Amino acid sequence: MMMLYLWLGFMYGLTMCSLTWKCVNCFEFEHSQPLPLQDWNNNVTYKAAAAEAEAFAYAYARRTPPLMVGLTLVNAAASKGAVCLDGSLPGYHIHRGYGSGANSWLVQLEGGGWCNSIRKCVFSKKTRHGSSHYMEKQIPFEGILSNKAEENPDFYNWNRVKVRYCDGGSFSGDSQNEAAQLYFRGQRIWSVVMEDLMSKGMRYANQALLSGCSAGGLAAILHCDEFRHLFPRTARVKCLSDAGLFLDVPDISGWRTLRYMFAGVVMLQGMQKNLPQGCTKRFNPIMCFFPQRLIASVRTPLFLVNTAYDTWQIQVSLAPASADHHGNWNGCRKNYARCTGSQISFLQGFRNQMLHAVRGFSRLKKNGLFINSCFAHCQTERQDTWFSPGSPHIKSKGIAESVGNWYFDRAVIMAIDCPYPCDHTCHNLVFK
């Protein structure tokens, strides 16, 4: 039996160790399944890796299927102009809490990149990130949204909501392009969804957590203080951003690719008036779409979960094909194990800039950090990285435990990993 689990774990690692970049133009990563990637290339002995694979395979084989939750469209949104890129209704998925979690709410904002030009937004409006017509009618609730105590010990019985992302601007735009029939109404979508949830019981919450991943993680930072103002002072309200720490740094050619992309998003979607005024009074609004200029001034307690070697930023903003004229980064972009010494050195520099960006933020004890030295993107919404056998850890503490300890004030959490390649608990992403 042990050999059977070992074989299953090994084969699962081989078959699932891939991530497909489905939608290049709208900057979307999509997993076909949860990705429990074992770090076979990172100085881990075969015996240790095999034992971890066996434990994971055993647990995965015994795991019950995830809860499937249906899509709810916000019918009142149309009259307020709170619509997706194509003019369709926005929506969310909700699973009700019970027992001690009946008056606790977790609202997760979906990610999915941005569209920074008319051409890309026209493409996006024919996908699930631009139209509710293309959204799945049911989605699995896993990771931080799981309804199982053994998978999500602190939040399993809360009211848990996944807000779908269909505006291409981190729920922050407010304009339209009549010629292209595009609606950039992210701010209105945010408002109307919050109103709808408040009418369904969220106004009675004594505990609430706003979370999000990637573009949704950025949105969680941008809307964190707005979310806090929905509730009375007596309520415990905090925010969590996963893989949302997008940095304004030069790419491998010296060009600031992400700044150019964000400039297109901010200007096209007319979000200048919706960005935090404390920032826009001091900086160009484009600069205020970068979390590094916002996080220290967010008044509501905020927790950042991020990998020091974020695979989205490596592929799209640090070493994009547009900056890699000779293709020297083709291998490294897809597989960290194929990076040269000089490329790893460049990525270590990126890690250093990330640590510098959170320096002021980390001085505030109300905040929290979990920056691990992995090659990944979005770790709270995947079960294998959120809470499971062999999930990523920093000094014996995993992501779910760290977030829970911070949220419930059980401990101050400022966890920063040692540099690559020291962490052998990573579930690193390898791309096709």
Image (cartoon, rainbow, N blue to C red):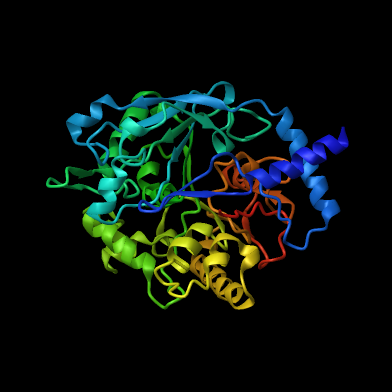
Determine the image quadrant of residue 72: top left
Q: Looking at the image, which residue is at 66% across and 66% down?
A: 420
Location of residue 165 (image quadrant): top left
| As drawn, 109 above or below 73 | below
| Residue 231 in the image, given as x and y percentages of width and height | 39, 36
Query: Residue 12 appears at what percent x and percent y?
Result: 70, 41
Left or right of 128 in this view: 35: right
State how many labels appear: 0
Q: Residue at x 68, y 51 (%)?
A: 392
What residue is shown at x 28% (from left), y 63% (from top)?
263
Residue 132 locus on image (x, y percent):
32, 32
Task: Specify whether residue 264 is in view.
Answer: yes
Residue 273 visible in the displayed image:
no
**Which residue is the extreme one toward the front?**
326
Residue drawn at (39%, 65%) of the image: 293
From the viewer's perspective, tell me whether residue 232 is left or right of residue 14.
left
- Left of 393 or right of it: where is 117? left
Q: Position of residue 9 (x, y in %)?
A: 75, 41
Q: Quadrant of the N terminus?
A: top right
**Residue that protrudes farthest toward the left in the picture:** 179
Q: Compare residues 210 and 54 and report the one nearer the observer.
A: 54
The one of 144 and 276 positioned closer to us in this rendering: 144
